[in-house]
Amino acid sequence: MSYLALYRRYRPNTFEGLIGQEQVVKTLVNQILSDRLGHAYLFTGTRGTGKTSAAKIFAKAINCLDNKNGSPCGVCASCKAIENPANIDVIEIDAASNNGVNEIRDLREKVQYPPVSCKYKVYIIDEVHMLTGAAFNALLKTLEEPPRHAIFILATTEVHKIPATILSRCMRFDFRLIPDEQIADLISKIYDEQGKKYEKEAIFAIAKAGEGSIRDALSIADIALSYSNSVLTYNDVMEILGSSNAELLYDFVENIIKGNSGNVLSTIDELCSLGKSVGVLIKDITLILRNMLIIKTCANSNDILGLPIEKYNLLANICKQTTEQRLIRILELFAESENSLKYTNHARIVFETSSIKASKPESDYDVDALLARVKELELKVKDGIKVEISNQNACQKVENVVESVETKKTVAKQAISSIPLEELKGKLLINLRKNGSEALWNLLQTVDIKVVGSILTITTFNDCDQEFLDRIETREKIDQALNDFLPFELQVQLDEREKILDEIDEESKRLKEIFGEDIVIIKNN
């Protein structure tokens, strides 16, 4: 095979070539230069962020006879020996296919043998989280006290699956997602070297599609390299990524903002006829709405988005027709519909329903949606635009949202004071019994309950009961048991007679301590 994939061809051979992991590189280089090497390392992070590359570079660097600022020279006998696939001093193990206890036992036996041509024998165990429980147990003792000539490097994308006993024996290094700008710079250099002409926006689109993974981005760049012999454009990259027709999607979003429900459904029919799945369509629309939200809130929005100027201007013009609150609500609707796709066989109906709801705010009675409509009305009034509301129901809903809190409290007080006390107490006891709160059910049958205005007062006859009822979890159970009624304020108090008796007991105890129990006699009248 003559052609080598870009991500393999441009795999870094030195720490200087490792992109976006400065915090890892600095620590490893300092350990090499100061000769303070650990016996076990754990490299964790998302796929394509350089974990295996860093492990290979580190293995060469610690064995290099003449390292350059911590990086391997690549020309000494040790570096050349490690580059040889037949080398037995740097061993790579794929834990996904060698995850049994027998493989780890074999490793434990062979690790005792010293290296042949290098200073250290290095074991790189990739996807280490795939090992079985028995295999981890077999590896545990070797990791704790390995031979002086052995160093282990464990790499994983799912560190939470590794036992704590293994984690505690390793130096952990977290590999971060690579910034889009650094990935774009790398792809630009590769294309320049390959003689490929490109638009800047196309390169940035490839970098963003990688989502922080260099390997994913270079795989897309590899496809784009062969896509056409002419200049690589932004639209070419969108075609490669399988994104839906951008113009149709922009029209779709604009029709939602303008409330043109008929056009929304027509555009959905046209988009689905292109063969795109509903899940892909929702993701593409969500991305556009997210870009609009960035345009609406950030001053340097296109520095973040990296869109072609004509597409950026088109989105900016659509943004002028709506508010941040409306965009957030539309995003929530499509996020909910994307989640609903997992549980339905009628994906298109779910998509169409969410789209109509997004285009018709008056049909959405969610509080956030109502607040967004109020905000739009405020902006129109501020701009001196005459506002006409033909839908009386929608108008009434808006008025309900902005109704004063004090009015609601007054209504609640009047409503709860009209509830018969026996009905209230009976409902409370029945629901407590249903919820399994037996102790509270028994206690409330021995106390007095009164309702005054919006205050529900429970009077107890001893301090222990009062303390129990004052607990947060007890109050929550009472609130839950009375959730059919309007909100009220719960108040717990000790019976006045009990307070007086407690005071008499305290005073009697004090007098007996002073004069003696045989002299002080307490008489009950």
Image (tube, grey):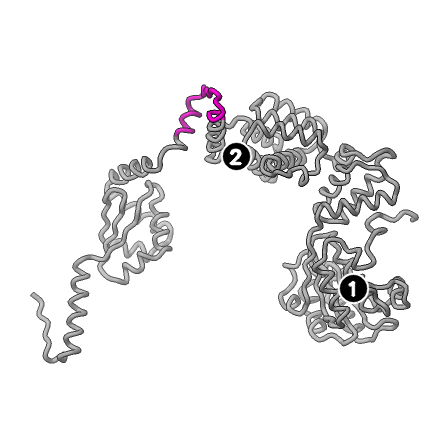
Question: Residue 322 or 518: which is nearer the viewer?
Answer: 322
Would residue 298 be found to the left or right of residue 366 on screen?
right
Residue 274 in sight in this render: yes
Which residue is disc 1 drawn over?
58
Disc 2 crowd, CA 10 A, few/some/many (<14, 14-19, 20+) = some
The correct choice, above or below, for 135 with respect to 349 in the image is: below
Label placed on residue 446: none
| Secondary element at image label 1 | helix
The correct choice, above or below, for 400 with respect to 470 in the image is: above
The kind of residue on which mark 1 rests is Phe
Which residue is disc 2 drawn over?
325
Residue interval drawn in magenta? 380-399
The correct choice, above or below, for 190 with respect to 370 in the image is: below
Locate residue 361, reporting x and y percent.
Answer: 51, 28
- Mark 2 or mark 1: name the one nearer the start of the chain: 1
Quarter in which the C terminus is drawn: bottom left
| Secondary element at image label 2 | helix
Asked which quadrant contains residue 209, the reply is top right
Q: Look at 68% across and 66% down and name the residue there.
A: 171
Asked which quadrant contains residue 443, the reply is bottom left
- The residue sitting at the left extreme is 525
Locate residue 71, reporting x and y percent.
Answer: 81, 63
Does 391 appear in magenta? yes
Question: Residue 426 or 210: which is nearer the viewer?
Answer: 210
Disc 1 crowd, CA 10 A, few/some/many (<14, 14-19, 20+) = many
